[in-house]
Amino acid sequence: MRFRFVEEHRASFPANRLYDVVGVSAGGLTAFRSRPANRRQRSDLVTLAHIKEQSRLSLGSYGRPRMTEELKQIGLDVGHRRVGRLLRQNGISVVRTRKHKVTTDSNHKFNIAPNLLDRNFTANEPN
């Protein structure tokens, strides 16, 4: 996490100052850059690819619980917290849609009130 911070802010601040503040060395940063991804990171990438595919297929309607169930049906052994973390870190969110509810019935047999004002809203005198 420290090395990522140094990488992100290296353009804004002098490198030596960042190393001192964060408490890392230049050699440690070089080792961090050349270090291969660990098993969890590789597994997260595979899981994330499946999550993106399932999200696309569901038109963005699957959240953490349903996404976890879909991944388990595919054969991936993942938990809901891991799926939630990957969704959150990658900005994948649920698109909630609501059905349009009609509140006005224009085809009724009730009496229609007459238009007395006829859109004339000017007053001739007060009161």
Image (cartoon, grey):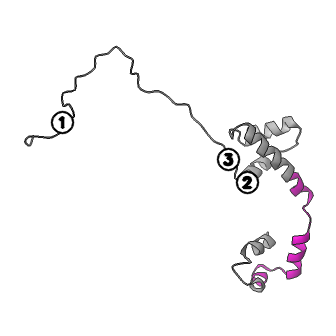
Residue type at mark 2 is Asn
Q: Which residue is mark 2?
A: 90
Sequence-first disc among 1 and 3: 3
Q: 34 and 84: which one is in front?
A: 34
Residue visible at 73% across and 43% down in the picture: 64
Using the rendered view, name the quadrant where residue 30 is placed: bottom right
How dense is the environment of label 1, judged by Cα within 10 Å: few (below 14), some, or many (20 and up)? few
> Identity of the amino acid at label 1?
Asn
Residue 12 image point, x, y percent? 69, 79
Distance between the alpha carbons at the discs numbered 1 and 3: 50 Å
Q: Is residue 98 left or right of residue 61?
A: left
**Element type at marker 3?**
loop
Whole-percent x, y for residue 70 in the image: 80, 36
User: What residue sits 78% from the left and 42% below the top?
Assistant: 53
Q: Is residue 91 above or below residue 13?
A: above
Compared to 17, does 94 lie above or below? above
Name the image quarter holding residue 51: top right
Q: State which quarter of the image contains the C terminus.
A: top left
- Image location of residue 26, percent across then percent down: 85, 81
Considering the numbered disc 1 on the image, is that residue within a helix, a strand or a loop? loop
Q: Which residue is mark 3?
A: 93
Q: Which three-letter amino acid code belongs to the residue tagged 3?
A: Ser
Q: Which mark is residue 13?
A: none
Above or below 15: residue 32: above
Q: Secondary structure at mark 2?
A: loop
Disc 1: which residue:
120
